[in-house]
Amino acid sequence: MPYQVTTTPIDGVLVLEPKVFGDARGFFFESFNAKDFAQSTGLDVEFVQDNHSKSAKGVLRGLHFQVQHAQGKLVRVTQGAVFDVAVDIRKGSRTFGQWFGLELSAENKKQLWISAGLAHGFLVTSESAEFLYKTTDYYHPEFERSILWNDPAIGIEWPMHLIDGQPLLASKDLNANCLANAGK
């Protein structure tokens, strides 16, 4: 298989580890190949947008989702490291309100597939990080919503010991709703 795929406790969240070829000169890997992605995951998705962000240590982005035009995301880090989180906000799901998180880094080259209908966020744990993600739908700011990063109903165990002080948040994330009011 082109990717090693690991399932998680949340349906629709997969960890992908691409085959990396390396030697004393450096490394090479295919970060995305549609045929191999479909073969490895069993998913037939079409990506329509690529996003790239750079953030300083301690920046926390999320937990974001769109109430219409929900986006599936394939995310990875090309520089630095983040703690990446997906939260199941699909009403009626057996794992509603549960979260899954892991370190994504330039070093480990892991990728996370997050199905449409889940909220997503990350905390930068290195001095800075460059984060790339492919999406299955376009960004629609009028439909974007945020869930409070530290909502006790979810209980995400963010690795705060890896940053100095409190996370740095955008105003939309400071003023986010709790899970109970998500989507409003």
Image: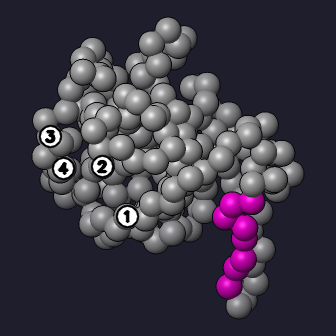
Q: Which residue is mark 4?
A: 169
Q: Which mark is residue 61?
A: 2
The reply to whether discs 1 and 2 touch (Cβ–Cβ < 8 Å) is: yes
Q: Which mark is residue 174?
A: 3
Kindly report the distance in space between the C-alpha atoms of the residues bearing marks 3 and 1: 19 Å
Numbered disc 1: secondary structure: strand
Verify whether residue 151 appears in magenta: no
Numbered disc 4: secondary structure: loop
Disc 1 marks a residue whose amino acid type is: Ser
Disc 2 marks a residue whose amino acid type is: Arg
- Disc nearer the start of the sequence (1/2): 1
- What is the x, y in percent for residue 89? 42, 22
- Disc nearer the start of the sequence (1/4): 1
Numbered disc 3: secondary structure: helix
- What is the x, y in percent for residue 32? 69, 60
Kindly report the distance in space between the C-alpha atoms of the residues bearing marks 4 and 2: 7 Å
Numbered disc 2: secondary structure: strand
Disc 3 marks a residue whose amino acid type is: Leu
Comparing 26 with 47, the one in front is 47
| Secondary structure that dominates the magenta span | loop
- Disc nearer the start of the sequence (4/2): 2
Q: Which residue is mark 1?
A: 53
* Residue 99 visible: no
